[in-house]
Amino acid sequence: MNIVTKLLAGVVLLAAANSAFAGETLDRVMENKAMVVATNSSWPPQSFLDDNNEMVGFDIDVSREIAKRLGVEVSFQTPDWATLTGGRWQGRYDLGVGSVTPTKARAQVIDFAGIYYYSPYVYVVHKDSSAKSVEDLNGKVIGVETATTSEDFINRKLEIDAPGLPPVEYKLTPGEVRTFADSMLPFDDLRLGAGVRLDAVIAPEQTAMNAIKNGYPLRILDGGYAFREPLVVIGEKVDPEWTAKVGGIIEEMKKDGTLASLTAKWYGKDYSAD
């Protein structure tokens, strides 16, 4: 083998090594054997700190399972919601597992790796409220978490970017909308009494049921869901190979029943199916 042949062989081997994973984020995760997940720290039962100051919850278990199937360790960061869903992470996070709704606006700045469960949103009132139907909330003070689909919904601006979903129906005209920086803060106001600060909250059924389970004097209004949304694992818009890799793992978790099992564990029912 002459020197030129040796050099060419070296270049080929080097190129093969460098393209072993092919993709900025995929390379980083697989080479470091570590994945950083952006999520929430105060959204039970999706993700929250337990009494030992450890991250637990449905989204945490999903993240750990994805990491396990990749063969890497996982750690968590808890940026504010706008940062988590706004993209341009600059490598600070490898994946976002925070029960994010795929909206048309978000599709411009982040990648959707795959739908991993579905969440119905409900109207929640104080247990002593006289409201019997959604119509009874017209003109009332409604609380929602800011920068979420519940805020988009109450303002009649919700645009979910997923195929096959029925059109959103708007049946409520609020008198006032109050926004909160955290998912549990609206419930803290509502628990003070019917009409004291809020008349109702629009939130995921899982979050509302968890609040009631933990002693909040609330009830879910009968009459159906406000809307139902898919939730996606997200990635930065820099690495299609990474997005596809994670998407494949999500599909495996659906097919083998892992996601059904995890939703039942944390929510008491299977939210993994459309």
Image (cartoon, rainbow, N blue to C red):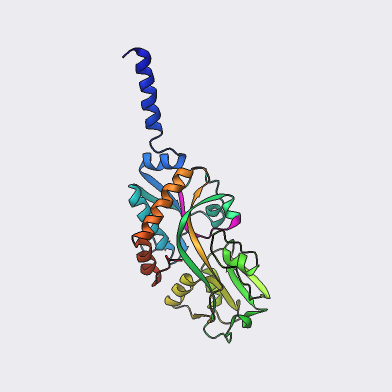
Instruction: Work out whether residue 54 can be spotted.
Output: no
State the quadrant of the N terminus.
Answer: top left
Q: Is residue 242 above or below residue 117?
A: above
Q: How many marks?
A: 0
Q: Does the magenta segment cover residue 123?
A: no
Q: Report the residue at 57% width, 49% height from top.
A: 109
Q: Report the residue at 47% width, 78% height from top.
A: 216
From which residue to which does the magenta span run?
94-104
In this rendering, position of residue 220 left or right of residue 11: right
Q: Residue furthest left?
A: 1
Instruction: Work out whether residue 160 can be spotted.
Output: yes
Rendered location of residue 9, percent (x, y): 36, 21
Rendered location of residue 91, percent (x, y): 49, 43
Rendered location of residue 266, percent (x, y): 38, 68
Q: Report the residue at 57% width, 64% height from top.
A: 149
Q: Residue furthest top?
A: 2
Rendered location of residue 221, percent (x, y): 53, 80
Q: Residue furthest front?
A: 164
